Image (tube, rainbow, N blue to C red):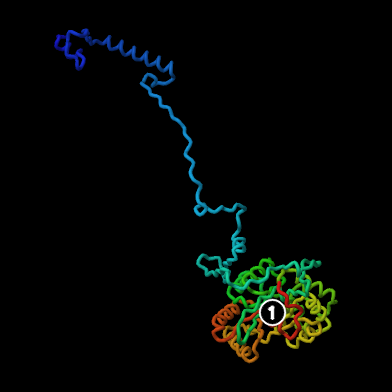
Amino acid sequence: MSDAADDILTKPLGVADKAARPRFALRSSAGAITGAGVLALVLLAGGVALTGDPRGGEPRAQAVIEIREAPASSPPRVADAAPPVPKGPAQSASEIEQASGVSVFRPDGSTAPDAPVIIRVPNATQVKLTPAPDPRLTERGRHGPLPRIGEGRLRPLDVYARPEEPGNGPRIAVLVSGLGIGENATLGAIARLPAAVSLALSPYGGDLEKTATRAREAGHEILLQLPMEPFDYPDSDPGPQTLLASARPGENLDRAAWAMSRFPGFIGAVNFMGAKLMNEPAALEPVLKDLSARGLGFVDDGSASGSQIAGVAAKTKLPTARAEIVIDAIARPDAIDAELARLETIARQKGSVLASASASPLTIDRLSRWSRDLEARGVRLVPVSVLLRRAGVAKLTSAAP
């Protein structure tokens, strides 16, 4: 290789003086290249053996990472803090409804997604009834808790009643019976009827304490249906706990006690059937006397002719009222509407009147429609207790709970 070529290949960049540096000869041969390759492999293998890293021969850099504590942040303001989430077991839909007071149901019992539903949201401004049971008015019986008169002659009829709202003009009291048996019918009556309408629960229903609580939370005062013997018993059978005209007084009182222990908070009783028993003063008197001694009232639903309730009740000092109209005695829309119109006429003539009805869907619908603009017609609804306590019987107490 010529000097010129040697200079080009061996002269370091930036070095001008050729004589000032040693000269090397570059030889290119197969043996030299092979030797260099072997040497490189030996060096690489040695690096792996010493460091365990196939890239151990490469340049490395080390960096020191210092861990510092984050600066303390100021605590969140109370207004910005998230409210604590209560912990506890999961609740069912019915438990949530009961806790919130909101009721959701389907009037026709359908479970189809597009079926109509009624949602009742409690009104914070509505009349609040005294919680039940009140321990001052409760005693233990053979079948469970029973109502009683408390100290100071305090009666369940007074404590559990819905207060009468102020107003003037003719008054109508309506008692709807037969609740507690069918859930949809019961919830429909509670949700759709005005709170001033009183409700009577059958002792044969299921989960009656919950039903009674729902009704009273919605503002309805409640009564107990007492199953009583009709003339065509047992063809018409009020149930296994029927009070019979031929039974011994102790037996009827025990059956009445069973019915009264089924749920708390009722202001009195109303007959379920019972035409025969209510025409037998001797069999009727012990039962009415017991109701009076417990501070309750009694409503004759008006379905039985020749009832002896009024005379026996006066003898036992039991507050009593009798329904003058059975609204749905003929279960047709036009017939029910005609009876409701007649009810208004009687109220304007007498000042006040009591009517009874069943809890059938048809009756609930007609009552709901009729009551919407009742006050605009100059008539107001009042609870049954208003008429019971003003039925000409001396009131035992005026004490408030």
Secondary element at image label 1: helix
Q: Is residue 148 visible?
A: no
Determine the image quadrant of residue 146.
Answer: bottom right
Using the image, determine if residue 343 lies above or below residue 212.
below
Work out whether residue 71 or residue 45 is closer to the camera in this orientation and state it: 71
Using the image, determine if residue 30 lies above or below residue 210.
above
Q: Is residue 97 visible?
A: yes
Work out whether residue 107 or residue 323 is closer to the camera in this orientation and state it: 323
Residue 194 percent coordinates (x, y) = 59, 77
User: Which residue is at a point 55% across and 86% down the rendered structure image?
Assistant: 377
Residue 79 percent coordinates (x, y) = 51, 54
Q: Is residue 2 left or right of residue 300?
A: left
Residue 39 percent coordinates (x, y) = 34, 12
Q: Is residue 123 left or right of residue 303?
A: left
Work out whether residue 340 or residue 382 is closer to the camera in this orientation and state it: 382
Instruction: Locate the N terminus and report the quarter of the image it occupies.
Output: top left
Label 1 crowd bin: few (<14), some (14–19), many (20+), radius 10 Å = many
Amino acid at the residue labelled 1? Ser
Mark 1, residue position: 385
Using the image, determine if residue 324 lies above or below residue 101.
below
Residue 152 percent coordinates (x, y) = 78, 74
Determine the image quadrant of residue 221.
Answer: bottom right
